[in-house]
Image (tube, grey):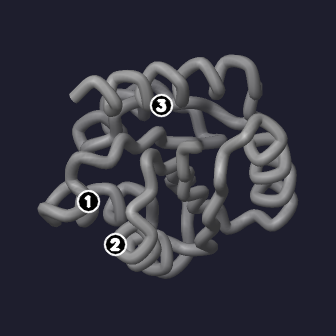
């Protein structure tokens, strides 16, 4: 059973997405800002991280760069989640170290496909 760290400051988004992931058999750990996300990634050792990019305290861009710089967390796949789908955001997310990118509002089927692809890739690595 894969463990997913959901880093999301919006309570409604966090609640909805965590319940849907749990219904599909994932263990979900949550963080509400970038600092907490980095700390939980280090303590919980998740199989994958869903990272909102617009976070308080430490934004998702900086949190991702930090996670990719630490040996203990650098191999954890990260999917960027953003409501501000501007031209160049996907590239910016990949440059920050994200392994994939998805837009809000979340289309669960599409997001789950990305999650499963990255988890399979991780299992085979």
- Judge depth for marks 2 and 3 and give the one in front: 2
Q: Residue at x 45, y 25 (%)?
A: 87
- The quarter of the picture where residue 24 lies is top right
Rounded to the nearest angstrom, the CA distance separating label 2 from label 1 is: 6 Å
Point out the frontmost of discs 1 and 3: 1
**What SS does tag 3 mark?**
strand
Q: Look at 34% across and 72% down and name the residue there.
A: 42
Q: Which residue is mark 2?
A: 42
Contact (Cβ within 8 Å) of mark 1 with mark 3? no
Q: Nearer the viewer, residue 6 or 3?
A: 3
Mark closer to the chain start, 2 or 3: 2
Q: Position of residue 16 (x, y in %)?
A: 86, 50
Which corner quadrant of the image does residue 59 belong to?
A: bottom left
Numbered badge on residue 73: 1
Circle number at residue 101: 3
SS type, badge 2: helix
Q: Secondary structure at mark 1?
A: loop
Gap between marks 2 and 3, in whole Å? 22 Å
Q: Does residue 38 sit above or below 110 in this rendering?
A: below
Counting residues from the N terminus, which is met first, the one under dot 1 or under dot 3? 1
Question: Along the line of sight, which residue is nearer the eye, 5 or 65?
Answer: 5
């Amino acid at each position: 059973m894969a463990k997913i760290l959901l880093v999301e400051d919006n309570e409604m988004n966090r609640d909805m997405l965590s319940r849907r992931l749990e219904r599909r058999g994932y263990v979900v750990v949550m963080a509400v800002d970038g600092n907490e996300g980095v700390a939980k990634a280090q303590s919980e050792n998740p199989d994958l991280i869903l990272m909102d990019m617009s976070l308080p305290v430490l934004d998702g861009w900086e949190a991702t760069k930090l996670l990719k710089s630490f040996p203990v967390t650098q191999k954890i796949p990260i999917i960027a989640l953003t409501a501000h789908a501007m031209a160049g955001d996907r590239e910016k997310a990949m440059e920050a170290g994200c392994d994939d990118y998805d837009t809000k509002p979340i289309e669960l089927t599409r997001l789950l496909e990305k999650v499963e692809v990255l988890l399979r890739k991780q299992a085979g690595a």
